[in-house]
Amino acid sequence: MSFLSELIKLVYQVDGDDFTAAGSASSDVKRIMKQLGMDSEITRRVTICMYEGEMNMVIHAKGGEAFVEIDDEKVKILMKDKGPGIPDLNLAMQEGWTTADETARNLGFGAGMGLPNMKRYSDEFQIETKMGEGTTVTMQIWLNGGKKVA
Amino acid sequence: MTVQELAIKMEFSVAAGAKAFNKEVCGCYIGDLLSRVISRSKPSGAWITIMTNVNVAAVALLSDVACVILAEDVEPDPPLIERCDIEGIPLLRSKLDAYTIACGLKEII
């Protein structure tokens, strides 16, 4: 018997610059995964990936959209924004490097861990960015045989 | 040890989330950078911080920490108190610094 009888598709609009509502999409995905009885470690990794993506869209891109698919084999997260794009991806992937402004830093953001965490906690990570057009991040977390991340 | 027992022994004051005081506490994490906290803290741990904005509630919820302990007598923002009450996140306050709180936790947990 399969884990899910059908593919679950979730879509979220993430508001830009709204720090008070930040994390609501991540919370909803976590709640649904718990209701489905999914593995707690898989849920934790999905939650971290979602939250980092959500916060990046709030802080840097004036919001965007998140698409989540859950099936028998994986959780797939696609996060798409129409922000300014990332000028130097190599720098952006380095832990500790950030362009978050003072407002975001004062709230505890801007650790420079966003993209590195998304890559670290997903089994597959892809990022496409174009200056002036936006950034799309795709992450997949496998339900079986994926990474063990401390 | 429950959050309630911890709060009594360490003389923490309660800012919010009293309805979830029966949660079990195990270990702690000290940090103010939210990306660090969400990826490094452990479920059922106590999170010690000096951050007081509403985003603390979101990270506490996503991380499954047992409680948040505000160190150095910092005052939580009203939206944080409100969110912690709604979500059932125990929010505690202490006059002690993070190191002293962590040492105290090690003694009693």
Image (spheres, rainbow, N blue to C red):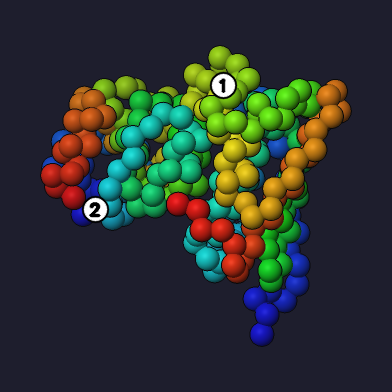
**Circle 1 — which element?**
helix
* Amino acid carrying mark 1 in the image: Ala
Q: How far apart are marks 1 and 2 (CA)?
A: 34 Å
Report the quarter where the N terminus of chain A lies: bottom right
Q: Mark 1 lies on which chain?
A: A
Name the residue rendered at 26%, 29% in the picture: B98
| Closer to us: A73 or A31 | A73
Question: For the point 75% across and 40% down, which residue is it?
Answer: A127
Badge 2 density bin: few <14, some 14–19, many ≥20, Cα 10 Å: some
Q: Crowding near pointer 1: few (<14 within 10 Å), some, many (20+)?
A: some
Viewer-proximal residue, A91 or B90? A91
Q: What residue type is labelled 2?
A: Thr
Q: Residue A104 carries which label?
A: 1
Q: Are marks 1 and 2 on the same chain?
A: no
User: In this rendering, is residue A16 above or below A13?
Assistant: above
Task: Give x and y (percent) for residue A37.
Answer: 54, 69
Residue topped by disc 2: B2
Q: In which quarter of the image is residue A43?
A: bottom right
Residue at disc 2, secondary structure: loop
x and y percentages locating residue A103 in the rendered image: 56, 17
Nearer to us of marks 1 and 2 is 1
Q: Which residue is drawn at 56% across and 21% down?
A: A104
**Label 2: chain letter:** B
